[in-house]
Image (tube, grey):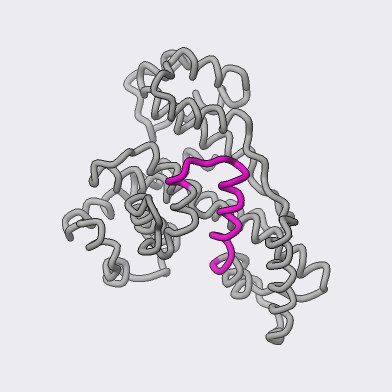
């Protein structure tokens, strides 16, 4: 987050902001991002067993900017096409419907990113973390022989509430003329993003496993139904932090978490996941452009 330093503030100041934030959440007065129409339709198509490549290509073609971004990413080193991909139909043939759906959803969600003047670097950091979490969630799902596409969405969207919380608390702080330092912002994001993310999940009609991953990944033992997805998302989030924030915790601290045992992952599995660093970074760098 923003590393600028501010004069210490009293406990009452953050409490004022928190009271207003909670009131806005309770009264549905939080400004939520709008799910891009194409993203919603691609997600629905990805979960439709009757969907085919032609329908996906036609859907992406409706947005020329999206189509151009999808082709750029499909041709990137992250996806390593054997030959240059010249069309969406070719992309489907080379990458498959599921992978092309993943790219299309990610690109369209990026276009709906929350804008916060003065916090562009923070939003970019949050987006990179989301991308890394999605990438790691896919790899964990492969190890566990779970649905890879569903795991990717869980990882990508697990912290979807953070930019909204950031925008809301910084606006409240500005209105109250209260300096809000990075530690306080970090506390607000950690304390309220799951709650706001759950509101977004309802508004966007996200699949139930994604909604539960958003709500429970930080305390997956309380997940009502989709505990595996919540556990995989918990680990993906942890790996993404380890990758993107090098001083977050050391190797032994990373491994010292019950989620590894709960997912039946062994030390060699952890080594394999950590060995994917360059692959995940390549994907993050490509998608974040």
**Would you say residue 131 is visible in this rendering?**
no
What residue do we see at 61% from left, 69% from top? 188
- In the image, residue 23 sits, relative to residue 81, either above or below, namely below
Q: Give the quarter of the figure containing the C terminus.
A: top right
* Pick the front one: 113 or 226: 226
Question: Is residue 207 rendered magenta in the image?
Answer: yes
Q: Quadrant of residue 152?
A: top left
Q: Is residue 23 left or right of residue 218?
A: right
Q: Can you give x and y, in whole percent of width and height, for residue 77 in the image?
A: 39, 33
Q: From this viewpoint, which residue is outermost toward the front? A: 224
**Would you say residue 163 is visible in this rendering?**
yes
| Magenta part of the chain | 190-210
Q: Can you give x and y, in whole percent of width and height, for residue 148 in the image?
A: 34, 38
- In the image, residue 283 sits, relative to residue 88, either above or below, namely below
Question: Is residue 83 rendered magenta in the image?
Answer: no
Q: How many marks?
A: 0
Q: What secondary structure predominates along the stretch shown in magenta?
A: helix
* Pick the front one: 178 or 210: 210
Q: Can you give x and y, in whole percent of width and height, for residue 260 in the image?
A: 25, 61
* Pick the front one: 137 or 227: 227
What residue do we see at 52% from left, 55% from top? 159
Q: Is residue 66 left or right of residue 145?
A: right
- In the image, residue 149 sits, relative to residue 263, either above or below, namely above
Q: Can you give x and y, in whole percent of width and height, for residue 46 in the image?
A: 44, 28
Q: Give the quarter of the figure containing the N terminus.
A: bottom right
What residue do we see at 61% from left, 18% from top? 62
What residue do we see at 32% from left, 21% from top? 82
* Pick the front one: 224 or 182: 224
Q: Is residue 127 left or right of residue 184?
A: left
- In the image, residue 277 sits, relative to residue 247, either above or below, namely above
């Amino acid at each position: 987050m923003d590393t600028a330093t501010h004069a210490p503030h009293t406990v009452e100041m953050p409490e004022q902001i928190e009271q207003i934030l909670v009131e806005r959440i309770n009264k549905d007065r939080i400004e939520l991002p709008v799910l891009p129409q194409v993203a919603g339709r691609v997600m629905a198509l990805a979960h439709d067993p009757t969907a085919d490549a032609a329908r996906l290509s036609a859907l992406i073609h409706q947005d020329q900017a999206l189509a151009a971004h999808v082709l750029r990413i499909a041709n990137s080193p992250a996806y390593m096409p054997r030959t240059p991909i010249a069309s969406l139909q070719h992309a489907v043939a080379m990458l498959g419907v599921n992978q092309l759906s993943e790219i299309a959803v990610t690109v369209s969600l990026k276009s709906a990113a929350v804008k916060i003047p003065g916090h562009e670097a923070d939003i970019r950091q949050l987006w990179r973390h989301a991308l890394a979490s999605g990438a790691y969630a896919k790899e964990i799902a492969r190890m566990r022989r779970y649905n890879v596409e569903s795991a990717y969405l869980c990882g990508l969207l697990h912290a979807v509430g953070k930019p909204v919380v950031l925008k809301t608390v910084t606006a409240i702080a500005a209105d109250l003329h209260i300096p809000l330092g990075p530690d306080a912002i970090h506390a607000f994001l950690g304390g309220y993003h799951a709650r706001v993310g759950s509101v977004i999940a309802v508004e966007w009609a996200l699949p139930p496993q994604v909604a539960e991953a958003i709500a429970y990944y930080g305390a997956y033992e309380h997940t009502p139904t989709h505990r595996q997805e919540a556990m995989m998302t918990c680990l993906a989030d942890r790996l993404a932090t380890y990758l993107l924030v090098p001083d977050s915790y050391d190797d032994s601290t990373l491994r010292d978490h019950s989620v590894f045992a709960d997912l039946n992952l062994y030390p060699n599995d952890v080594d394999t996941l950590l060995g994917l660093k360059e692959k995940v970074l390549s994907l993050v760098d490509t998608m974040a452009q």
